[in-house]
Amino acid sequence: MRLNWMPALVMLGLVALGHAEEAALPALIAVDAQQTARIDTVLQEMERNHGGTLVCDPADAALDSAAFVQRYLRRFGGPQNLPDYDYRFERLLSRLSQYPAPLADPRLDHDIWQAYRTYESVTHGATSYRKGDTIHGLDNARDLLWMYLTAQAGPICADPSRRAQWLDRLLVDPGTPAERLARSFAVLQLIAAVRGVHDHPLQVRLANDVALDAGSAGLRWFAERLGLGCIVWGINPATLPRPRIDAVNVSGRMTSFDMANVVDQESWSQDRHFFTTVFSQPVGQRARYMSVHLPEAPSDDGLFCFASQGVVNIWRKRHMVDAMPQMLEAAAIIDTASRYALAQRMGATELAPTVVRERANTAK
């Protein structure tokens, strides 16, 4: 178990993990009798929280298969207490980070999604839980979904049927505002895995206070200093204030400090927020998987920035979900007709581009 700084907590207790779509489960992926026996043995060990086989055994045709992952999720996505859930997902994620072949199998689409929906509906996106006086990190199905979408992004986007199904899951399926917000970040991860993202933080460091302009000029300055083009979606630039210069810790680590004056996404907010995707890996963890942390709730305060293909796209945070069809079209993952149809199914607000600036040749 690991300490997690995120504030989302779930109290220890029994949780019922289930979903109505379980009635339509696909058939189990077929394996031979020897592999079935091997898988069943390890699942029985994990029922007792004995994970030594998954930790110690080398590459294995049975354990490192989609059939094993599918059966694992169906066995351990049911009612259980959170320490068990945490440990079992830690073991699965650790194994997949070492032997990722199952992540390339599209037959896991349904079970990966059901595991995520179960996690989402029961924990409401929590990344930690309380046991007694101690807060523990919660390894979970969101981490697995991110791992899977990253591995499968290319095949999903290239297959019209799978692409439509995944976009309906992430953007059309009903959910609370917080659930829909989290799924919109999953869509951005899908885009990032296919098209790439800006290599550096969307942050401009300033040696001293400078006079910055309000409106579209401030946004253009921000993009130009990043060496990026700029598209502003659904915002009247005249309503934007001057960006605020904040002193923030830019070290990238909680345990060290490197304070600097910066302009970034939160410079247009009344207050600074955690409103981005953060990947963390505790010191000393041997497995290579990362835990995913997202905002806990939607926000009406300020702007959101997403940079890909040499352009920083900017829209208001309150339109986080609404912006997804435009981002998918801008990334050439869907066409205009598909974008319109998706927005209609979502009930999304159309965000028209109000500022467009070509990418600068060099950062200034």
Image (spheres, rainbow, N blue to C red):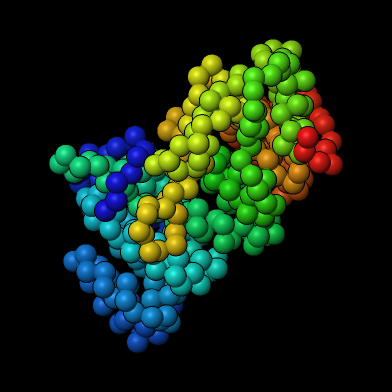
Q: Residue furthest front?
A: 207
* 248 horizontally vs 84: left or right: right
Q: Quadrant of residue 222?
A: top right
Which residue is drawn at the image coordinates 50% and 19% (left, top)?
Answer: 271
Of 188 and 73, the residue lying toward us: 188
Q: Can residue 163 be seen in this snapshot?
A: no
Of 125 and 4, the residue lying toward us: 4
| Residue 222 drawn above or below residue 1 | above
- Report x, y in % for residue 345: 62, 36
Q: Can residue 165 be seen in this snapshot?
A: yes
Of 265 and 159, the residue lying toward us: 265
For the C terminus, give its image quadrant. Answer: top right
- Report x, y in % for residue 152: 58, 61
- Report x, y in % for residue 362: 81, 41
* 176 horizontally vs 199: left or right: left
Q: Quadrant of residue 329?
A: top right
Which residue is drawn at the image coordinates 26% and 73% (left, top)?
Answer: 52
- Report x, y in % for residue 252: 50, 42
* 114 horizontally vs 57: left or right: right
| Residue 313 drawn above or below residue 153 | above
